[in-house]
Image (cartoon, rainbow, N blue to C red):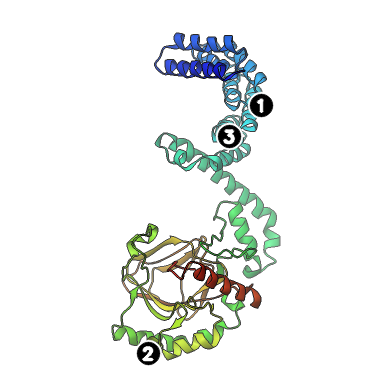
Amino acid sequence: MNDTHNERINALMLEGDRLAQDGQSISAAVCWQKVLELEPGFPPALDCLAMQAAQRGDIDMARDLLEQAVAAAPGFAMAHAHLSRVHAVLGNENAALASIDDAIKADPAAWGPRMEKARMLEAKGRDREAAAAYGSGLAYMPEPARQAPELQSLVGHAQRMVAENQARLRQFLEGRLGDLMRTGSPRKLERFQHSFDVLTGRRDMALSRPLTLPFARLPSIPIFHREDFDWAPAVEAAFPDMLRELQALLEEQAEFVPYVQMPDDEPKGQFAPLNNNPDWGAYYFWKSGQLIEEHAQRCPLTVEALADNAPMCIVPNRAPVSFFSALKPGTHIAAHHGATNSRLTVHMPLIIPPDCALRVGGETHAWKPGELVMFDDTILHEAWNNSDRLRVVLIFDVWHPMLSDLERQLVSETIAGILEYNDNIDMGEL
């Protein structure tokens, strides 16, 4: 088959499609018949003629043409889907399901056939299977299709079917697991409970997405237990001193600089509202690995508690970084991912009015003054102050507890190497 032959077939198919769209069905059919004269059994032409036959009510002809098309091209998903509809019109439900399954096999990533299968299963009262099909249809559905106004009814119905099935599954499993679950403490059951919530649609799986330096084989844990860190009690013991030093700064109206300060040529994204905005202010003790002497002298006990006890990240000219983080009333820090999962971000809550919280990977945590919070900031997280008063926490970074001393050194040298390779230009957070 030469190129001229193929070009002629393509031209006739396109012309047939154009004529059909213009309502010239007879002329369109002539084009597709000419294709079959040039290439007998050409599946797309058979499919088009079959759809015309179905539209004029000749269902038997439509079925015959589509059976020829799928016999000639078993991987032609659209023809299988069309054949499924024809079988449904003819009242052959089993054949309709078989054909839609063939369409899915031919194009597994196509969401339409999966939704059609779900609709057919639902009509037969097979709700569990229908929910599974709706779920896979939603999974393969691209975001523009999910948002399309004409598909909102379908998307909403599919989501409800999935949610209702997950609720029924949860109830069933709770009955099966109840006795076993009652043998464990909340702490012992925490990981399984989270898994159970993901399985049954109560929460999303928390995934670490480091922006710059990913460290492999570390678990994605949103919020860690402070009781597991032997250095934490010593830092928490300094809470009264930290609070007194902070209050002195606030009374003196010490300057808190905007935490978000992005280069002019960098997209601001979710941080646009806070860029160069003192609504999220920082009073640094260490910045880019350097101790700010003036601030350390004004808050010596805060600095001493961290320097003597916390395993802060050490990277030449980069870390530690530690600061009082002040969030003014009504301020929201949009959800975002941090730079590297080789560290944990730690909050020491100092001034915590009501209606303030931190959310990490679907877990919402209300700060308690004096109790440290350790979390993986490469998991999607956000924070807000919905009160009418200032919220302040002390923020610092520590090494991830699963990193060995050698791994810590390697991470430190890697970050230093990245900076050196790029001539020590400001690369944002690393």
Residues marked 1 and 2 touching at CB (< 8 Å): no
Callout 1: helix, strand or loop? helix
Residues marked 2 and 3 touching at CB (< 8 Å): no
Q: Can residue 404 be seen in this view?
A: no
State the image coordinates of residue 7 (x, y, percent, origin top left): 52, 19
Q: Which of 87 and 61 is in front in this view?
A: 61
Of callouts 2 and 3, the N-terminal one: 3
State the image coordinates of residue 235 (x, y, percent, origin top left): 52, 85
Q: Is residue 71 visible?
A: yes
Q: Mark 1 points at which residue?
A: 98
State the image coordinates of residue 409 (x, y, percent, origin top left): 61, 76
Q: Give how far apart the Cα atoms at labels 3 and 1 are.
A: 12 Å
Question: Which callout, 2 or 3, points to the residue nearer the camera?
Answer: 2
**Quadrant position of the N terminus in the picture:** top right
Q: Mark 3 points at which residue?
A: 114
Q: In this view, does 231 lie above or below 175?
A: below
Residue type pointed to by label 3: Arg
Displayed quadrant of residue 122: top right
Residue type pointed to by label 2: Arg
Q: Is residue 30 above or below residue 198?
A: above
Q: Name the residue under label 2.
A: 298
Q: Give how far apart the Cα atoms at labels 1 and 2 are.
A: 76 Å
Callout 2: helix, strand or loop? helix
Q: Nearer the viewer, residue 38 or 287?
A: 38
Of callouts 1 and 2, the N-terminal one: 1
